[in-house]
Image (cartoon, helix red, strand yellow):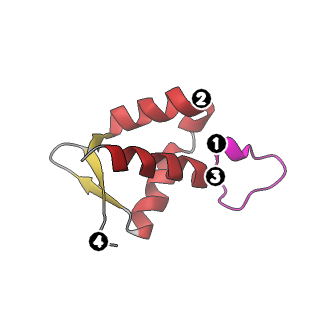
Protein backbone atom coordinates (compact mmCIF):
# COMPACT_ATOMS: atom_id res chain seq x y z
CA UNK A 1 0.00 0.00 0.00
CA UNK A 2 1.31 3.35 -1.01
CA UNK A 3 -0.38 6.72 -0.80
CA UNK A 4 2.34 8.22 -2.96
CA UNK A 5 1.82 6.75 -6.43
CA UNK A 6 4.50 5.21 -8.57
CA UNK A 7 4.38 4.01 -12.17
CA UNK A 8 3.00 0.60 -11.19
CA UNK A 9 -0.04 1.84 -9.28
CA UNK A 10 -3.47 1.94 -10.85
CA UNK A 11 -4.91 5.34 -9.81
CA UNK A 12 -8.45 3.95 -10.01
CA UNK A 13 -7.83 1.68 -7.02
CA UNK A 14 -5.54 3.97 -5.02
CA UNK A 15 -6.16 4.65 -1.33
CA UNK A 16 -7.12 8.25 -2.11
CA UNK A 17 -9.63 7.25 -4.80
CA UNK A 18 -11.20 4.54 -2.65
CA UNK A 19 -11.37 7.00 0.24
CA UNK A 20 -13.19 9.51 -1.94
CA UNK A 21 -15.67 6.83 -2.98
CA UNK A 22 -16.22 5.84 0.67
CA UNK A 23 -16.94 9.47 1.62
CA UNK A 24 -19.44 9.69 -1.25
CA UNK A 25 -21.23 6.60 0.05
CA UNK A 26 -21.23 7.91 3.62
CA UNK A 27 -22.80 11.17 2.44
CA UNK A 28 -25.71 9.17 0.96
CA UNK A 29 -26.46 7.11 4.08
CA UNK A 30 -26.51 7.87 7.80
CA UNK A 31 -24.30 4.87 8.44
CA UNK A 32 -23.21 1.83 6.49
CA UNK A 33 -21.87 -1.51 7.66
CA UNK A 34 -18.35 -2.67 6.89
CA UNK A 35 -19.59 -5.52 4.71
CA UNK A 36 -22.02 -3.35 2.73
CA UNK A 37 -19.36 -0.71 2.19
CA UNK A 38 -16.84 -3.30 1.01
CA UNK A 39 -19.45 -4.76 -1.34
CA UNK A 40 -20.14 -1.33 -2.86
CA UNK A 41 -16.42 -0.66 -3.34
CA UNK A 42 -15.91 -4.01 -5.09
CA UNK A 43 -19.01 -3.52 -7.28
CA UNK A 44 -17.89 -0.07 -8.41
CA UNK A 45 -14.11 -0.38 -8.49
CA UNK A 46 -13.45 -4.09 -9.02
CA UNK A 47 -11.97 -6.85 -6.90
CA UNK A 48 -8.50 -5.28 -7.02
CA UNK A 49 -9.79 -2.48 -4.77
CA UNK A 50 -10.39 -4.99 -1.96
CA UNK A 51 -6.68 -4.97 -1.10
CA UNK A 52 -6.58 -1.21 -0.45
CA UNK A 53 -10.01 -0.97 1.21
CA UNK A 54 -8.77 -1.32 4.83
CA UNK A 55 -6.00 1.20 4.17
CA UNK A 56 -8.53 3.70 2.82
CA UNK A 57 -10.66 3.24 5.96
CA UNK A 58 -7.61 3.77 8.17
CA UNK A 59 -6.63 6.86 6.17
CA UNK A 60 -10.08 8.42 6.59
CA UNK A 61 -10.23 7.48 10.28
CA UNK A 62 -6.85 9.10 10.93
CA UNK A 63 -8.02 12.26 9.16
CA UNK A 64 -11.06 12.34 11.45
CA UNK A 65 -13.54 11.97 8.57
CA UNK A 66 -14.84 8.58 9.62
CA UNK A 67 -16.49 7.43 12.82
CA UNK A 68 -16.74 3.75 13.71
CA UNK A 69 -19.89 2.56 15.49
CA UNK A 70 -18.86 -0.59 17.36
CA UNK A 71 -22.38 -1.68 18.32
CA UNK A 72 -23.55 -1.96 14.71
CA UNK A 73 -20.09 -2.59 13.14
CA UNK A 74 -20.70 0.31 10.81
CA UNK A 75 -19.21 3.65 9.79
CA UNK A 76 -20.64 7.12 9.55
CA UNK A 77 -19.31 10.40 8.21
CA UNK A 78 -17.88 12.61 10.92
CA UNK A 79 -19.11 16.05 9.83
CA UNK A 80 -17.67 17.83 12.87
CA UNK A 81 -14.08 17.65 11.60
Residues rendered magenta in the picture: 1-14
- The residue wearing badge 3 is 1
- Disc on the earlier residue, 2 or 3: 3
Q: Are marks 2 and 4 in contact (CB under 8 Å)?
A: no
Could you give the CA–CA distance between mark 1 and mark 4, rounded to whole angstroms? 27 Å
- Disc on the earlier residue, 4 or 3: 3
Q: Is residue 3 magenta?
A: yes
Residue 19 x %, y %: 51, 52
Q: Can see residue 55?
A: no
Residue reaching furthest to the left: 71
* Magenta stretch: helix, strand or loop mostly: loop
- Tell me the residue at 57%/45% (across/down): 52
- Disc on the earlier residue, 1 or 3: 3
Q: Nearer the viewer, mark 2 or mark 4?
A: 4
Q: Are marks 1 and 3 in contact (CB under 8 Å)?
A: no
Residue 38 x %, y %: 43, 35
- The residue wearing badge 2 is 46
- Disc on the earlier residue, 1 or 4: 1
- The residue wearing badge 1 is 13
Q: Nearer the viewer, mark 1 or mark 4?
A: 4
For the C terminus, give its image quadrant: bottom left
- The residue wearing badge 4 is 80
Amino acid sequence: MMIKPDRHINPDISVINIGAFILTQLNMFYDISYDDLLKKVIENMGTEAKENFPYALNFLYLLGKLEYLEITDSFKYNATK
